[in-house]
Image (cartoon, rainbow, N blue to C red):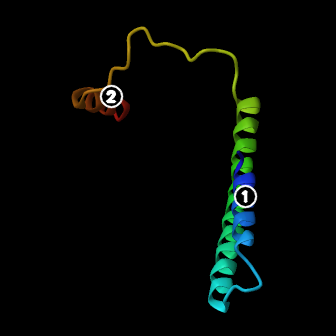
Amino acid sequence: MSFKDSVNSLREKIKGHIKPESSKEELEELNGMLASLDDMEEVHNELGVENAKFKDTIVKMVTSQGDDNPPPSDPSGSKPKSMEQFIEDFQKQNK
């Protein structure tokens, strides 16, 4: 069952409790529940629109920036420089 179907089902159940002999307090409570369902549905729709924007952005990035080549592998692995190497390189550049 989708979100919209669930909300509509709850809405119909709440409306089923509204009767001509219902008290003012009961009607206010039931109308408050209906308003909460409307708010939930609105927030859900806004999130759907926002997620669609993210999806479009991701698809655009993948189609325009990606390629079929696997990332290059470094057979020697990543070796960070030591402080001595940084100092040596700095001295060579500044002589």
Above/below status of 63 relative to 25: above
Circle 2 Cα neighbour tier, 10 Å, few/some/many (<14 / 14–19 / ≥20): few
Give the quarter of the figure containing the N terminus. Answer: top right
SS of the residue at dot 1?
A: helix
Q: Is residue 4 left or right of residue 81?
A: right
Task: Give the total number of marks visible in the rendering.
Answer: 2
Foreground: 51 or 10? 10
- Residue beneath label 2, please? 89
Which amino acid, mark 2?
A: Asp
Q: Is residue 89 left or right of residue 10?
A: left
In x, y percent, where is residue 59? Answer: 74, 36
In x, y percent, where is residue 47? Answer: 68, 57
Q: Residue furthest top?
A: 75
Foreground: 33 or 87? 33
Which amino acid, mark 1?
A: Ser
Q: Residue, x 71% and y 42% (percent of image)?
A: 55
SS of the residue at dot 2?
A: helix
- Residue beneath label 1, please? 9
